[in-house]
Amino acid sequence: QQPVQSPQAVILREGEDAVINCSSSKALYSVHWYRQKHGEAPVFLMILLKGGEQKGHEKISASFNEKKQQSSLYLTASQLSYSGTYFCGTESSARQLTFGSGTQLTVLP
Amino acid sequence: SAVISQKPSRDICQRGTSLTIQCQVDSQVTMMFWYRQQPGQSLTLIATANQGSEATYESGFVIDKFPISRPNLTFSTLTVSNMSPEDSSIYLCSVVVGPNEQFFGPGTRLTVL
């Protein structure tokens, strides 16, 4: 079953912060986050394993609440290069990812 | 990470024909997946292609329509058979590197007329 992402779209000014949420109805082994720019393949950002960890990657970080089966991606002081569609992929078994519908992020100068 | 290439990068095909898409990885990987991404949509898993075993297909995808080969640990092919315009999509392979990280190839953009 496809995880639910919110919001569907967000528009920011450069330097502003954003949060993208991903929730699943199934027990999760891990959550993967990707960014995809138009006409390009998804680019791996980070993976969070069950255990409620939080990770950071430059000014992009994420958390994973295993009990709530939710993950959030935090973008701080957004840059123009952050624009794209963000997908969460949830893994319940066998490394198979089920992707959310995506969040389109637009960063304006 | 891994360097993944796909051929062709794009193609325009006639209804009823078949196209074979190749996925090449620069290192040996056990787990490989094929996904489809229709325009403006999310990614949908077609099948898992692990070397040494038959490909396993997700609901809605069948071997007769999407035969897959995985002859070794660095290569796989996906064939889209008897194509119709509904098969127009981007097809991507992905591989698992290390314990958990999954990386995507650049994709093959298929248009069926």
Image (spheres, grey):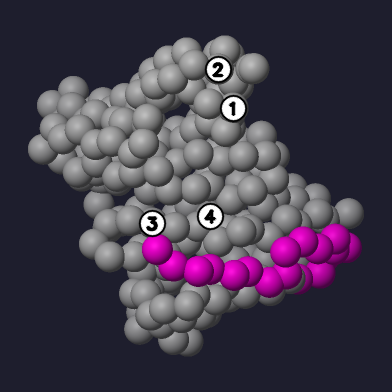
**Residue A80, disc:** 1
Q: Which x, y percent locates residue A85?
A: 56, 32
Instruction: Report if residue B7 lies within the magenta region.
Output: yes
Q: Amino acid at mark 4?
A: Tyr
| Mark 4, secondary structure of its residue | strand
| Mark 2, secondary structure of its residue | loop
Residue named by callout 4: B35
Note whether B99 is above or below B25 in the view shown: above
| Mark 1, secondary structure of its residue | helix
Tell me the crowding category of disc 3: few under 14, some 14 to 19, or many 20 or more residues within 10 angstroms, Cα based.
Answer: many
Note whether B6 is above or below B35 in the view shown: below
Pointer 1 indicates a residue of which chain?
A
Q: Which x, y percent locates residue A28?
A: 22, 39
Going by the image, does A86 lie left or right of A92? Answer: right
Q: Are marks 1 and 2 in contact (CB under 8 Å)?
A: yes
Closer to the observer: label 4 or label 1?
A: 1
Of residues A48 and A18, the one drawn nearer to the viewer in this rendering:
A18
Q: Quadrant of residue A3?
A: top left
| Mark 3, secondary structure of its residue | strand
